[in-house]
Amino acid sequence: MNVSEISLKTGFLKWKPDYDSAATEYGKAAVAFKNAKQFDQAKDACLREAAAHENNRALFHAAKAYEQAGMMLKEMQKLPEAVQLIEKASMMFLENGTPDTAAMALERAGKLIENVNPEKAVQLYQQTANVFENEERLRQAVELLGKASRLLVRGRRFDEAALSIQKEKNIYKEIENYPTCYKKTIAQVLVHLHRNDYVAAERCVRESYSIPGFNGSEDCTALEQLLEGYDQQDQDQVSEVCNSPLFKYMDNDYAKLGLSLVVPGGGIKKKSPATPQAKSEGAEATAGVDEEEDEYSGGLC
């Protein structure tokens, strides 16, 4: 019987298990297993440590142990299970009154799962943003919303992306970061045009005129040219705007939206001017027709 199990035993003179000592011993065992790269045993030790802390009503330490168990699962490449435990830890951090630690745990879980399950990562980033927003830490909240928006765009979930970007824009407006609001308007317009919703795209630009400095900015001018080209089905004009540095050096996901934007119906091509040779041939043909008409101008008789 090891020390941690002895700590949990009760007897005639020991009425309550010593959960505190047991948790300490399980924690030591977890570290030893981790150092030996025996991650499965380390995970089990962390879970036992977490249970001991819970029984001792030490929520913060229990949450830390669950988070560590999740990290052991990450080492074993069991990412969905890892995320599940880290989520559990974050809920306990919130219950314990430590929202910052909860938010950091949720963000860590999002990063773990992002490449395997982007939909789950979006949910985790949005949860993290909500925690930060509730704590009035708006800069951290908007950063996480940005991660969610980019993942939604990457997954071509444009309806959700449009709502997410609008929420970002509202927060940037609240903290008076107006230049970033302009960039978010560009992102919104590109998303709406990929949704084939010209009306929504135009409304975004129109509503942005109320943002200080937007009207007359290069962002505003470029968007007006983009919408004009799109409305007139002028693919050349749309491509010219989307290939400008203003669009190409945006976050990669939005730059790709610009480069792949096609106007309705495939667009119209500008007519190439007629060559001098074609013009002269056309004139000769017209003259020939006129001569034939003159020959019979007096009728057949």
Image (cartoon, rainbow, N blue to C red):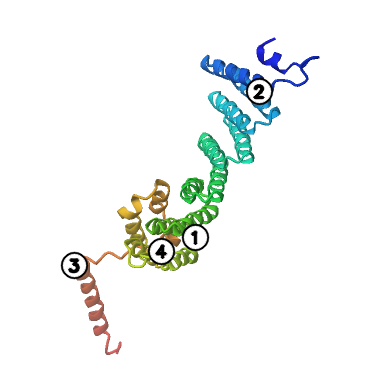
**Mark 2–mark 3 distance (CA, rounded to whole Å):** 95 Å
Tag shown at residue 196: 1
**Mark 3–mark 4 distance (CA, rounded to whole Å):** 33 Å
Among the two numbered marks 1 and 3 on one chain, the one whose residue lies closer to the N terminus: 1
Among the two numbered marks 1 and 2 on one chain, the one whose residue lies closer to the N terminus: 2
Is 228 in front, or is 103? 103
**Mark 1–mark 3 distance (CA, rounded to whole Å):** 41 Å
Is 78 in front, or is 235? 78
- Kind of element beneath mark 2: helix
Residue pointed to by mark 2? 20
| Kind of residue indicated by mark 2 | Asp
- Residue 278, given in percent of the width and then of the height, sits at 22, 67
Residue pointed to by mark 4? 230
Among the two numbered marks 3 and 4 on one chain, the one whose residue lies closer to the N terminus: 4
- Residue 45, given in percent of the width and then of the height, sits at 62, 20
Asked if the residues shown at circle 4 and circle 1 are in contact, with their CB atoms under 8 angstroms apart, the answer is no
Asked if the residues shown at circle 3 and circle 4 are in contact, with their CB atoms under 8 angstroms apart, the answer is no
Among the two numbered marks 2 and 4 on one chain, the one whose residue lies closer to the N terminus: 2
Q: Between label 2 and label 3, give the one nearer the viewer.
A: 2
Q: Residues within 10 Å of mark 3 (few under 14, many from 20)?
A: few
- Kind of element beneath mark 3: helix
Q: Is residue 274 above or below residue 86?
A: below
Is 292 in front, or is 105? 105
**Mark 1–mark 2 distance (CA, rounded to whole Å):** 61 Å
- Kind of element beneath mark 1: loop
